Image: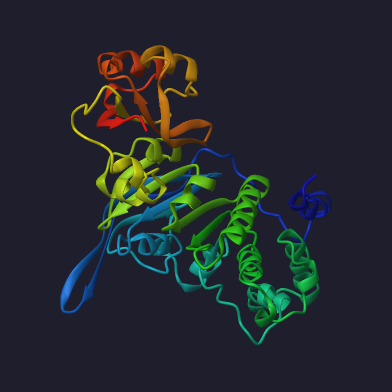
Amino acid sequence: MNALAEAIRPEVEQGPALWQREVKPAGEALVSFRQVGRQFQAGGRSVQALQDVSFDIQRGEIFGIIGRSGAGKSTLLRTINRLESPGSGQVLVAGKDLSGLNEAQLAQARRGIGMIFQHFNLLSSRTVAQNIGLPLKIAGLPQAEIDARVDSLLQLVGLEGKRDVYPARLSGGQKQRVGIARALVHQPELLLCDEATSALDPETTQSILALLRDINRQLKVTVVLITHEMAVIREVCDRVAVLEAGKVVELGPVWQVFGAPQADATRALLASLNHELPADVAGRIVAEPASAQSELLLDVRLDGVSGQDPALGPLVAALGPATRLLHGGVERIQGRAQGRLVLACAPQSRNRLGDLARQLAIPAGNIRILGYVDHA
């Protein structure tokens, strides 16, 4: 049993403290955006932050929202818990429009929606335990119950020995774990993450993503995260929406959006993950064969649509035994092989590109002729 399951097991078996809420079936909509729009006034002019946004986030999934700076990501996320109010349309959480609630009702509804932030937002004058327990203290729970739940959450996030430590003595990753514990203190069914890993180093980011993945799977908490880090989306999300100028320009499973992006904004965001041609290869490409040693250079994109892994045997059968792999790489996203292969082969192989596409089970448009290079 992993540490997360061990942490919640006594409460699951014995009752009160950590996780008492009813777990509802996955697959139905938990958050629904219905033609959501939002305008701001900036510099004497109107800025359309969100435009006709409509999609659902399903219970039990980890949903990512990506986009360039100013695309509307944070505004959209904050409409879920009414930190931002839509100018038009509706945002439904568990089928309810929070806009019709009074202040007390909204405060109650927000207890079912945890939120973690990029900069942690911890109170420096309070200990780790006091930071985590503060929402419960404000809600008026008895101190004994607060202490029991805080201790369980400290074990959950791996900070058992930091109960009485002040934030100044914590690393960035530890501060974010405190933030996650605080966000879970009301036993929410929904967790909103606003650039939760962008202030962390790569190793710490991986540990926080692993914790969020475990919270999602073990506690059945739906997670919605916004980020500018494409690797974060690739690592943990089930589906992703791409925003550009306040509009949803692409939506789908992560493997599909990353493997065959349709929108220019998506392609621009994913550029950092591409295996670009190294300068020593790019500098040698010419439009026509220069000598008897010239090879045809092919750019092959694997989009994962077929669900098949690329086999080397059929590739060589289609292009010939002298085929060489010059550059590229293949990775797996949600169980599907995706990537780019830059191949050097005999010039006459350009007549067999249809065979190559069939062998790899990819569209013919995924194979592009880059030119020719001399065999170095």
Q: Nearer the viewer, residue 317 or 376?
A: 376
**Residue 107 vs residue 259: left or right?**
right
Front residue of 249 and 28: 249
**Residue 307 image offset from top left, x and y in percent:** 47, 24
The answer to whether residue 244 is left or right of residue 254 is left
The total number of labels drawn is: 0
Q: How is the image coloured?
A: rainbow
Picture residue at 43% right of the left edge, 15% below the top: 321
Front one among 180 and 196: 196
Q: Position of residue 78 (x, y in %)?
A: 42, 64
The answer to whether one can see residue 68 in this image is yes
* Above or below for 323 versus 45: above
Relative image position of residue 157 (x, y in whole percent):
70, 61
Q: Residue at x 69, y 80 (%)?
A: 169
Residue sitting farthest toward the left? 45
Placement of the C terminus among the 4 image quadrants = top left
Of the 4 image quadrants, the one containing the N terminus is: top right
In percent of the image, x 60 and y 78: which residue is there? Answer: 122
Q: Is residue 94 visible?
A: no
Please say if 297 is above or below 91: above
In the displayed image of the protein, which residue is found farthest to the bottom?
A: 125
